[in-house]
Amino acid sequence: MSSFFGWIKTHKLIILLSLVIIYLLLNSSPSTNIQTSVDRFTTGGIVSEKTLGFSPVQSIPAPGGTSLQTAPQTNNRMVVKESSLSLLVSKVVETQKKIIDAVVKNGGFMVSSDLSNPQDIPTATVVVRFPTQKLDQMLEYFKSISVKVISQNLQGEDVTDQYTDLQAQLDTLNKTKGKFEQIMDKATQIQDILEVQRELINIQSQIDSVKGQEQYLQKTTQMAKVTIYLSADELNLPYAPSEAWRPQVIFKQAVRSLLNSMRSLGSLAIWIAVYAVIWVPVLLIILFIRKNRSSQ
């Protein structure tokens, strides 16, 4: 028994690390996990809060000086803006190119561009991103190069609280990393050093993940996303027609159906003519045989 307690005294850091890891697995809150794990190290006598030079995490100041415990001001909210437009245009391909060129000139970029049925009645879908402050200006330009605006939608998602939480997590993680680095300086045995290094690697992985989420939110709030549907026919656009029965549209559909039927008949005639080298001789042979039988 005395040897067991002696082993505990000489491997105090390993025991504390084991307790920390078990507690981290049982606790679901990332910020609480990290702070508690360090507190366990400090209460174990390896290093104290006073030695580290700072107290446990209190309210964390935001970049603008506002405490993260209070909600940011309305004019500083971070909003992800997205919009969609359905435009009736006379020349789909030309309008599609104009939209992409205008977006690039205004500091944006094309996300995707699709064009279907270019030989008949073309339909296009363009997804672009550009600086959010130019959203109203660009939307007005898109509408100005169309024949008719069929539908428009604008929506925003407030991600301020999400961004604030990420900042709080990052601040806590950085402070905790500093504590573990100072614990590392006080470790003497190789096994203890390896345990602390494992914790540092885990914390650094969390820091990188939080930074990635922060950067993603910053970019999406700075660049508005707009999806534009283009067509020369209203029925090809994603909207519900305001009139249940429209003779002009029905006439266009009937003409289109007639043309398709004539194309099908023309294709059938071509197939028949090409295969005439087979069916014409066969037909002549059959007629010749029947004529001989009738003459007998």
Image (cartoon, rainbow, N blue to C red):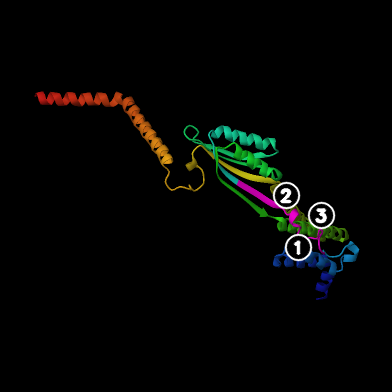
Q: Nearer the viewer, residue 22 or 253?
A: 253
The magenta region covers 58-83
Task: Say left or right for 253 vs 125.
Answer: left
Secondary element at image label 1: helix
Q: Can residue 30 be spotted in the picture?
A: yes
Dot 3 crowding, Cα within 10 Å, few <14, some 14–19, many 20+? few
Residue 75 spot, x, y in % from top left: 75, 54
Q: Pointer 1: residues within 10 angstroms few (<14), some, or many (20+)?
A: some
Residue identified by numbered label 3:
64
The disc, 3 or 2, on the residue closer to the chain's N-terminal end is: 3
Q: Residue furthest bottom?
A: 1
Q: Is residue 231 left or right of residue 1?
A: left
Q: Position of residue 160 (x, y in %)?
A: 72, 56
Q: Residue at x 78, y 58 (%)?
A: 173
Residue 169 painted magenta: no
Q: Which residue is mark 1?
A: 31
What's the residue type where badge 2 is placed? Gln
Tag 3 near tag 2, CB within 8 Å = no
Specify which label sits upstream in the sequence, 1 or 3: 1
Front residue of 7 and 12 = 12
Q: Quadrant of the N terminus?
A: bottom right
Going by the numbered disc 3, the residue's amino acid type is: Gly
Instruction: Look at the image and say whether residue 81 sits in the magenta stretch.
Output: yes
Q: Position of residue 98 (x, y in %)?
A: 61, 34
- Where is 217 relative to 118, above or below? below
* Residue named by callout 2: 218
Residue at x 55%, y 38% (from the top left corner): 114
Task: Check the image and report above or below for 214 versus 288.
Answer: below
